[in-house]
Image (cartoon, helix red, strand yellow):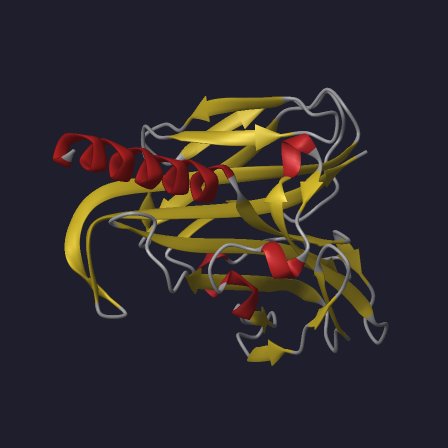
Amino acid sequence: MKILKTTLLALFCLLVYTHANAHALWIETATLGKKGTLHDVKVYYGEFALNERDAPEKWYSDVKEFTLWLVAPDGKKTKLETKAGGTHYTSSFTPENDGVYTLMVSHEAAELGGTTKYHFISSAQVAVGKSTKVNADLNTNSLKVYAANQEIFGKGKSIKLYAQLNGQPLANKVVNIASPEGWSKGFTTDAEGAFEFAPLWSGRYVAEAENYEKAAGTHNGKTFDAAWIGSTFSFEVK
């Protein structure tokens, strides 16, 4: 009986881990904005490649209590208000200056998945005016994926993305790319945390980097022995 209970507990923990790990948090917003014009933002949770967007009441643990931050080109950081919709949260902001704006979410789930702590991260960028150069330092998320320039990329043309963990290149790790057609593929980063691919379809894509490591500690009064971080970055292809 003891062996059976242990086996069932292990299976339960695996199911919790698989469910949380398969899902991700991501931000959708138009790549280009206009100074003085309201710019809409949406935050989703689910599986982008499968076109699954969960209703907020079904989000894992307390992930729906995330905070959405906006960082202006000059580094000014503002907390944006969010409102629950049918399958997402909505928000908006009005750019006051030209440059690249950064949207960020970083939320550690209150509940553990078995003995694993989960950290959901997402970022997106909006270019306003002629300047499209990205200052990656303005994105303070511990794990991030980004492009050197914020632009609408071209179908069939090579795109270079970078991944960083705690300010250092996320080297020799697989970053998954999901397309609007349901296609998904992993690409391994080089020593600089960079990788390239050529999109086959137009539409919105989501890149997701992960990091899993053994790390003992306590979280909300419960002991964990591993930590998982998942970070997404969405972009447009025409």
Q: Is residue 60 left or right of residue 180?
A: left
Q: Please provide percent x and percent y for residue 29.
A: 73, 55
Q: Is residue 145 in view?
A: no
Q: Is residue 170 left or right of residue 226?
A: right
- Which quadrant of the structure image shows residue 210? top left
What is the residue that sits farthest to the right in this orientation? Answer: 37
Q: Please provide percent x and percent y for residue 81.
A: 66, 78
Q: Is residue 77 left or right of residue 143?
A: right
Q: Nearer the viewer, residue 7 or 29?
A: 7
In the rendered view, tell whether residue 136 sits above or below residue 221: above
In the rendered view, tell whether residue 164 sits above or below residue 76: above
Which residue: 64% across, 31% down?
49
Q: Quadrant of the C terminus?
A: top right
Q: Please provide percent x and percent y for residue 167.
A: 33, 54
In the rendered view, tell whether residue 229 sits above or below residue 47: below
Q: Is residue 231 in view?
A: yes
What is the residue that sits farthest to the front in this orientation? Answer: 1
Which residue: 66% across, 22% down?
183
Q: Nearer the viewer, residue 69 or 120?
A: 120
Q: Quadrant of the N terminus?
A: top left
Number of numbered labels in the structure image: 0
Q: Please provide percent x and percent y for residue 76.
A: 55, 79
